[in-house]
Amino acid sequence: MSEHVDYVVAIPARYASTRLAGKPLAQVGGEPMICQVCKKALASQALGVIACVDHEAVAAALAPLALENSRLRVCMTSQKPRSGTERIAEMLGLEHYPQDLILVNVQGDEPLITPEHIDTVAELIATKNADMSTLCSPITTVRDVFDPNCVKVVFNQDHFAQYFSRAPIPYERDNFMAGEVTELKFKHYRHIGIYGYRVRTILDYLQREPAELEQAESLEQLRLLHYGMSIAVAITERPPECGVDTAEDLARVNQILAAQS
């Protein structure tokens, strides 16, 4: 990091995943996935890492790592939160962090996230004075632009987000309406789901009614844009390969890690 920033990493992890049962305990690189994610966070410059879990088995899996490293803490949350954001907010109600503290939200199913990604998001929110910070990476394939599971982002000249969508944005009118699309004429960016924000922002966010666009797209970050908050976006040329939602994702992540070792 070019500038020293004090921040904490919060890692929400939900045990009862619908598409991959017991997901935080899925074996990644020979150990539970939640341990892999926490190790990546511990390798960053964060002051500390707090895993927000909802199952005793996940807490038990993290116990040896927490004993080895005093920067890692485990917070037991309930099964009520519907999202990682809500789970972090529940943790905040228990831990009482300062309102101005920067938190970086690293999803518990992103074992290929890097310490550099985490540090970048923390530095970005501090230097841009934004309400939130996040990452994106260039899209190079037509398939990804039209894939609703690949969330796109557009931003202004100061790298503040203007919109996030599952639809193709920007829409290349002449190109996309001409028939079968074989190449992209303009720049497109995939949103990477890692967020930086201050404690007060996440608590404020949850007090506000969901926005219509947020519900239409099923994208939480649109609530902040709806209420006039700012989201700074940095481009990374080295995005994490993939998160883990399914058994197929898990196999792919393990193949990537095996090739790296």
Image (tube, rainbow, N blue to C red):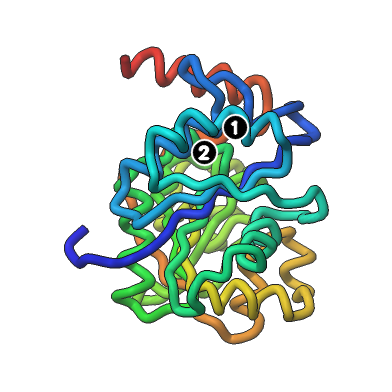
Q: Amino acid at mark 2?
A: Glu
Which residue is depicted at the point 45% across and 79% down? 100
x%, y% of residue 170?
52, 63
Above or below, 184 relative to 132: above
Q: Which residue is mark 1?
A: 244
Q: Which residue is mark 2?
A: 110
Task: Give percent across and percent down for residue 3.
Answer: 20, 67
Given the image, on which type of amino acid does mark 1 rest? Val
Query: Badges 1 and 2: C-beta atoms under 8 Å apart?
Result: yes
Q: Residue at x 50, y 47 (%)?
A: 73
Q: Quadrant of the N terminus?
A: bottom left
Which corner quadrant of the image does residue 20 belong to? top right
Q: Residue at x 29, y 52 (%)?
A: 45
Q: Is residue 5 visible?
A: yes
Image quadrant in which you'd find residue 156: bottom left
Q: Is residue 69 left or right of residue 224?
A: left
Residue at 80% in and 48% down: 79
Q: Quadrant of the C terminus?
A: top left
Is residue 145 among the parts visible in the rendering?
no
Residue 247 is situated, as x and y percent measured from the top left of the image, at 67, 21
Circle 1: element type: loop
